[in-house]
Image (cartoon, grey):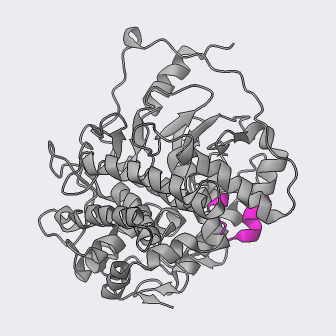
Amino acid sequence: MKKISYITWILFFILTFASCSCTKEAAKHSNPPKVVPPNEQPTPPTEKPRAVVPREKHFTNDDAFLDYIQKAHFNYMWEGAAPNSGLAPERIHIDVPSSDTHVITTGGSGFGIAGLLVGIERGFITRGQGLERFEKIVSFLEKADRYYGVWSHWMNDNDGKTVPFGQKDNGGDLVESAFLMQGLLCVRQYFKDGSKEEQALAKRIDTLWRAMEWDWYRQGGQEVLYWHWSPNYGWEMNFPLKGYNECFITYILAASSPTHAIPAEVYRKGWARDGAIKSSASEYGFPLILKHNVTGDHTGPLFWAHYSYIGLNPKGLSDDYASSYWDLNRNHTLINYTYCVQNPKHYKGYGKNCWGLTASYSVNGYSAHSPQNDLGVIVPTAALSSFPYTPEESMAALKHFYNDLGDKLWGKYGFYDAFSEQAEWYPERYLAIDQLTIAPMIENHRTGLLWKLFMSCPEVQEGLKKLNFKVK
């Protein structure tokens, strides 16, 4: 077996703690990770030889194929879940096992929680099995560290204590907690009229929801929400949430809270920046509609069209700044797709059946891939989690990934995180935030299950109304 080179191991050790959000990563540049001196480095692990994971080769129709794909990715949150909490491990590595298997991700767990509901509806698990897992999850979350009702980005599966995401990022993470609560509210709605045990679970979730102090994260009543608060460093991370990016759902939930709601003015002045969020730019003939953070008149990574829309239904949704959130996301996806088809950097493999740029592992660490940051790395979740917006293009990519590249891309929990034909790079690694949006978003394409559940929350409807959204 091949030993990893010393330099590669040093890079791996550092990048194990790389950000899972391009926006948040930018804020951490002022606090670079500590480099451990060479004489203190742990013994590098031995890379396991690659083995082709068996997979089904024939399906009666596309529905049966999608069932199989959803089940494989659902399994990251089922068989691959952290043993004590039942939540999602930050990462699962097959080739080079990681040393942080006890670290669970708050946002990724929210996506996985939504996926568990898909598992019940699709018959991957029984309703009773799902209830038992949700009771385990909620029991853990009730006891885990919270900061004004808000969980941290990472938690220790053993005891629920905060695992710092960075030196000063060791407290409440409002965005990751919004992703988590988006999934939990879907569960509440799913079970609220069920058996006595199911109704009890729904009430416990409601208690967690009511305890979240969204208004505290205005940092002293400012007209904007802030991403972090630390019991040691207060507001020193100083990261205001301004649109547009993946944080959209944070404002929707903050406005919808039955106990700690923000006024509409915080959305208007903070997120929408008094209208400066609007964009008149287009790419490849597709209007952006909203100005994407960092990239301005260009689109950001494709996960921005996924994370906030696990539960929030963009169909028929509009407000004072976007005439159609469906068009916003569909156009974002088609720009990403068209860029890959045109392939201006002439990377090997790109085309109509091989596309999708979003944040993921990359050849040299971790990167928020997009048309403005194209490193020759294709990320399967980008196309697969976009099924609602581009069903034909997404199906073409799925069949290519599975049938033509499956020997290199397919593993125990579905497609590995990312790959590069240009660099001949096919790591056997998973990230929860990429893996766990696939089953829910495919289900939203097929039945709208999670959209129906989340949008059935009366508080969400009131929150949208408060912010002057129109829902058709």
- Taking the image as shown, residue 294 lies to the left or right of residue 413, namely left
- Residue range highlighted in magenta: 383-397
Q: Residue 430's x, y, as percent?
A: 58, 40
- Taking the image as shown, residue 169 lies to the left or right of residue 453, namely left
Q: Residue 98's x, y, as percent?
A: 50, 28
- Taking the image as shown, residue 217 lies to the left or right of residue 68, namely left
Q: Residue 118 lies in magenta, yes or no?
A: no
Residue, x 71% and y 54% (percent of image)?
Answer: 69
Residue, x 44% and y 62% (percent of image)?
Answer: 183
Q: Residue 386 lies in magenta, yes or no?
A: yes
Q: Is residue 379 visible?
A: no
Using the image, determine if residue 130 lies above or below residue 251. above
Residue, x 78% and y 45% (percent of image)?
Answer: 348
Using the image, determine if residue 278 lies above or below residue 426. below
Q: Residue 272's x, y, as percent?
A: 34, 76
Displayed quadrant of residue 55 = top right
Using the image, determine if residue 450 lies above or below residue 400. below
Q: Quadrant of the N terminus?
A: top right
Displayed quadrant of residue 84 = top left
Residue, x 85% and y 63% (percent of image)?
Answer: 61
Toward the left, the furthest residue is 220
